[in-house]
Image (cartoon, grey):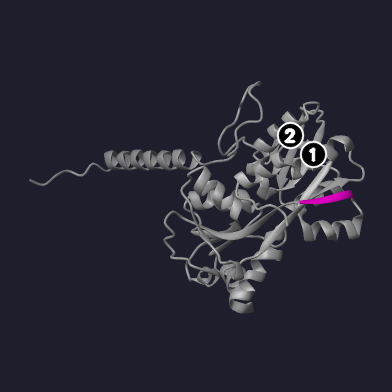
Amino acid sequence: MIGVFDAGRFRFACVAVTMAVAATVSVAQDKFDPPWNPPPAEDGLNFTVPGIDNVPDLQGDVNDPQLTVFFAGNQYMVVHDLVLGFRAAYPQYQRVFVETLPPEILTSQIERGALVVGNMRITLKPDIFATGRGRMEELQREKQWFARTVDYARNRLVIMTAPGNPGHIAGWDDLAQPGLVLCMPNPQWEGIARNQIIPALRQAGGDRLVEAVYEGKVRDGSTFLTQIHHRQTPLRIMQGKCAAGAVWYSEAYFHAILKHHPVSMVTMPDEQNRYATYTAGLMRDAPHAEAGEQFMRFLKSPGGQTIYQRYGFLPPK
């Protein structure tokens, strides 16, 4: 007996299957969408829509804050506990606003006087600006922004990979594999690329390796350059869009160990690694200078240091 092929019914079944698969993928991806921190307060209506309205790197009280902190973005995972600890230690300061964006974005925001995200415009001035020590020293030489500075934490590099490290990445040279899709920080925005990753690649494989990862693979589409690596790299790996990417240890530790997200991490021996020291500066024109002073003290206090080390950071030397 020869069956009769019903094209209309077949098309309907294919559409139904496609929609079901797409819905499954969407649910799986939405599960890991930021923000990855708990909300800053229990009160108020929490209206967060994964992938649409989540604003993960603007944290806390944007209305009339008593303290405003601009952190280099790789510290986003610390902010919730850090603010709670600071508020407990200094209860006179309850309204705290923190931005965790790439350092050059924050620098441009200060110079231009505002940050625009979607339809929102923020004109707050920071009391504290914090990023890598080298960049802080440059800003102080060029702009004399800071009344004083303090070192408060250190970090180092790892390679974040898809679960189980299917590319069998063991070191920097392996990032040049043909067809291995990478997420790498853009040197235009990200100090980690200019100051840590590119020197580590050059040490491991010379200019050949730097050019392979940051030029050849960019041209052939197998290196995706991020605008905000601390969000894009883990999310794209979890979504299956990238197989690996260089990140800070604290970022990989947060996702792989603390959140149990579907990523793995490849650590590097010291001789192949690069370290960074984070420095906080009290702005000379800080709107809340006294609160800024107290926050600087808290960063160095046992309470502040315990929070940073809980998230994989190292203490300052």
Q: Is residue 169 left or right of residue 121?
A: left
Question: Quick check: marks 1 and 2 in contact, CB under 8 Å?
Answer: yes
Location of the C terminus by quadrant is bottom right
Residue type at tag 1: Phe
Residue 148 falls inside the magenta stretch: yes
Q: Is residue 97 left or right of residue 176?
A: right
Mark 2, secondary structure of its residue: helix
The residue labelled by disc 1 is 295
The residue labelled by disc 2 is 86
Label 1 to label 2: alpha-carbon separation: 7 Å
For residue 163, say whether it is visible: yes
Determine whether 111 is above or below 276 in the image: above
For residue 211, say whether it is visible: no
- Magenta span main SS: strand
Of residue 232 and residue 67, the one placed in the foreground of this image is: 67
Question: Which residues are drawn in magenta?
Answer: 147-151
Of residue 12 and residue 105, the one placed in the foreground of this image is: 105
> For residue 247, which quarter of the picture?
bottom right
Of residue 300 and residue 285, the one placed in the foreground of this image is: 300
Residue type at tag 2: Phe
